Image (tube, helix red, strand yellow):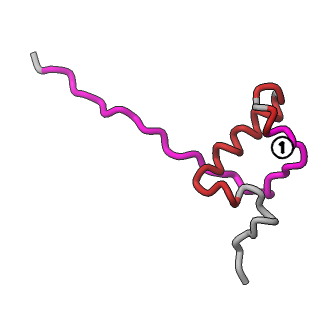
């Protein structure tokens, strides 16, 4: 039995590695619909995330820490 969701079950499936962006926009839409471009309103109006399907955000890139110059 497969545990993968089909695109009908998971509307984010077509966004590939950018799923986290859509999920982030959805959270903004819930808090304030005007904070998201109106082109997304129809998508989010009936969008329901899959239960327990938290999409991981990519690790933030950090600038390397430079050692203090030796005196």
- Residue drawn at x 79%, y 37% is 39
Residue 10 falls in which quadrant of the image?
bottom right
| Residue 14 coordinates in the image, percent (x, y) | 68, 59
- In this view, 25 is above or below 55: above
* Residue at x 61%, y 49% (from the top left corner): 18
Residue 47 placement (x, y as % from top left): 85, 49
Residue identified by numbered label 1 = 44
The quadrant of the image that shows the N terminus is bottom right
Q: Main secondary structure of the magenta part?
A: loop
Magenta run includes residue 43? yes
Considering every residue shown, the one lying at the far left of the view is 71
Q: Residue furthest bottom?
A: 1
The residue that appears at 40% across and 35% down in the rendered structure is 62
Residue 69 in percent (x, y) is at 15, 20
- The residue most toward the right is 46
Q: Quadrant of the C terminus?
A: top left
Q: Classify 10 Å Cα crowding around label 1: few (below 14), some (14-19), many (20 and above).
A: many
Q: Is residue 12 above or below residue 38?
A: below
Q: Residue at x 79, y 39 (%)?
A: 40
For the record, the magenta segment spans: 40-69
Name the secondary structure under disc 1. helix
| Image coords of residue 25 (percent x, y) | 72, 38
Name of the residue lying farthest toward the front: 39
């Amino acid at each position: 039995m497969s545990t993968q969701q089909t695109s009908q079950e998971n509307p984010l499936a077509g966004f590939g590695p950018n799923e986290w962006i859509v999920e982030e926009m959805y959270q903004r839409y819930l808090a304030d619909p005007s904070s998201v471009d109106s082109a997304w309103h129809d998508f989010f109006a009936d969008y329901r995330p899959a239960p327990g399907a938290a999409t991981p955000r990519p690790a933030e890139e950090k600038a390397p820490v430079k050692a203090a110059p030796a005196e």
